Amino acid sequence: MAQRTLRDPEALIGAGLAPESARAEIDAVNARYAIAVTPEMAAQIDASDPHDPIAAQFIPDPRELRTLPEELADPIGDEAHSPVPRIVHRYPDRALLKVVQVCPVYCRFCFRRESVGPQHGGALPRAELDDAIAYLRDHPEIWEVILTGGDPMILSPARMRHVMERLAEIDHIRIIRLHTRVPVVTPAHVDEALIAALKSAGKAVYVALHANHPREFTPNARAAICAITVSEPCPMSVAPTRTTSVPSAVSSTSASAVSGSPLPRPTFL
Ligand code: SF4
């Protein structure tokens, strides 16, 4: 198993996940979109299968560089609903808070791929968090805040706790929801400190786990999911990853794809 996250063509070729002949194509994709394949996901790829469903999600494909005239850089219209940086307020009673612009993996089909990656900055600057919190405080109709990005669960426990404590200041926020791939793609990141930070706002916390194939539910991933849902109960749902086009080799899955302990059924989402 690879020991580190694979982040460039050299690493992918060295790990046997891409042929040397694809170097120029992967270089071209890498110049525009971020690459990251965690050890947990790299170990799930069958490099001998040209239609491997895990590789289809994470290994760069030159078709990513083909842009049709009707395609948009912001296909879901986040910018039109962004009153202050990091906030997307599309529906009256809920708002997105983009706490980070990076992810542990980069999905080749992400509909926010133009705005995620290390080139777009790291964690939320304090001034932007202050402005976002002020906006949320000034809108009492918002009762649910959805942490997104990027992948919000990639935050360190200390940063997660800080965001949660800032949200705890606002009484009318009742629910905090996180959309994440972390428990399946880098389950080691889910530790006691992170889970405690999730609960530190004293609000109801819901986790929407993005996954696309049963093979993603490794023993480590199942342990991370159980830690979130059982030891410090946060309701969790499983949904296909945000995408404009799901690779044909990938099928969506559901909580029932996880054998072992059944996941609690969420009451929202
Ligand atoms: S789908 Fe989620 S984890 Fe994947 S690149 Fe997009 S924001 Fe990151």
Image (cartoon, rainbow, N blue to C red):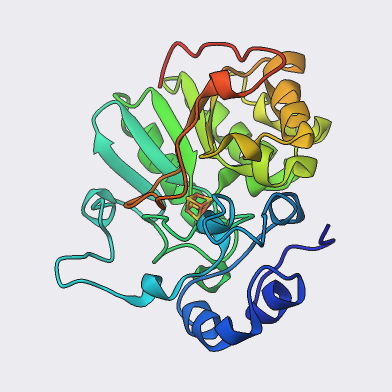
Q: Where is residue 244 in the image (x, y as percent from the top left)?
A: 32, 52
- In the picture, measured across the screen, residue 159 lies left or right of residue 75, that is right
99, 171: nearer the viewer: 99
The quadrant in which the C terminus is found is top left
Count numbered badges in the picture: 0
User: What residue do we see at 45% from left, 78% from top?
Assistant: 32
- In the picture, measured across the screen, residue 189 lies left or right of residue 149, that is right
Q: Where is residue 224 in the image (x, y as percent from the top left)?
A: 74, 31
142, 73: nearer the viewer: 73
191, 216: nearer the viewer: 216
User: What residue do we see at 26% from left, 73% from top?
Assistant: 67
Looking at the image, is 44 positioned above or below residue 115? above
Q: Is residue 205 visible?
A: no
Q: Can residue 187 be seen in this view?
A: yes
Residue lying furthest left? 70
Q: Position of residue 255 (x, y in %)?
A: 55, 21
Looking at the image, is 175 positioned above or below residue 50? above
